[in-house]
Image: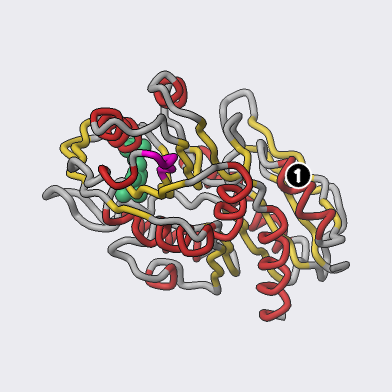
Amino acid sequence: MKEIIFFSLPGNDKLTDKLAVKMKAEIGNAVVRKFPDGESYIRILTDVKNKYAVLVCTLHEPDEKILPIYFLSRTLKTLGVKKVYLVAPYLAYMRQDKIFNPGEGVTSTYFGNLISEFVDGIVTIDPHLHRIKSLSEVYHIPNAVIHAANEISKWIKANVKNPVLIGPDAESKQWVLAVAKRAEAPFIVLKKIRHGDNNVEISIPEVVHFKNTTPVLVDDIISTAHTMMETIRHLKKAGMKPPVCIGIHAVFAGNAYKQLLDCEVDKVVTCNTIPHPSNAIDLSNVMANEIHKFISKLK
Ligand code: R5P
């Protein structure tokens, strides 16, 4: 697509290059850096007039990223782009979808409203849709949600013998079900009670029927990894094999990745929505197709 120009925000170059090649699109040259005092500096060095700009920025640790995206979008519009779209493979704040304690705000809505003010459309991968049923409830701009289930199930079929898919909590059912169906594998969904950021309790699973299978834990986000680790503890107690852990989004807060690897897991595998050593499932093909459809529809 000739009239599309990609811009990579810092740290997103690998994915941006893949998408641009697959979509036969140009990559724009922009300087995105900090002044010595910590303020953001943006300069666009490519002609962007009458083009559709696609900004690629995954949004884990989002607070630092949002202002450069805002400045880039505003500058592009000043320079005459037709539209600015944001490709955010991981979308932050989606878990803050209700008031959990008095005095809090629903930051998923605030964040959605904020982004909707300065880009013309957003494309993301499996956002955490739980109490919020559709992205349009919080993003008031055209949006597209890409699903990783197909690629995950292909990976499982190619790499795991005799798998049983395990969802650690009710919220994971949507992903586990979609993957299990495509991978033609059985699945179980467990019950989780979260007592705090780092304290989760998982119900003891009915796993006796699955002792000779390879457990494959599937969740959308691995953040502190406590959900996975607590599940693994129960599987071990029930005498199951070391599991393969699959997360769509490799958030891995602090040393969560190391802690998870130390839990006698078979493997930890994620999709490339957030650059991380565990990335083994490439979503760039499905992304390129969906971004192409999304922009063509809006033209
Ligand atoms: C929450 O419901 C999500 O689907 C994940 O289970 C959760 O975000 C994982 O978080 P953590 O790795 O911190 O336990």
Q: How many marks?
A: 1
Q: Is residue 128 above or below residue 281?
A: below
Residue 39 horizontal/vertical position (percent): 58, 34
* Nearer to us in this view, 1 or 109: 1
Residue of label 1: 43
Residue 194 horizontal/vertical position (percent): 20, 41
Instruction: Tell whether 175 sits left or right of 157.
Output: left
Query: As drawn, which residue projects farthest toward the left?
Result: 102
Instruction: Tell whether 50 sits left or right of 180.
Output: right
* Nearer to us in this view, 167 or 49: 167
> In the image, what residue occupies the spot 81% across and 62% down?
23
Residue 94 horizontal/vertical position (percent): 38, 54
* Nearer to us in this view, 15 or 152: 152
> In the image, what residue occupies the spot 21% across and 32% down?
199
> In the image, what residue occupies the spot 59% across and 51% down?
157
> In the image, what residue occupies the spot 29% across and 30% down?
239
In the rendered structure, which segment of residues is drawn in magenta? 212-217
Label 1, residues with CA under 10 Å away: few <14, some 14-19, many ≥20: some
Instruction: Tell whether 129 sits left or right of 116.
Output: left
Quarter occupied by the C terminus: bottom right
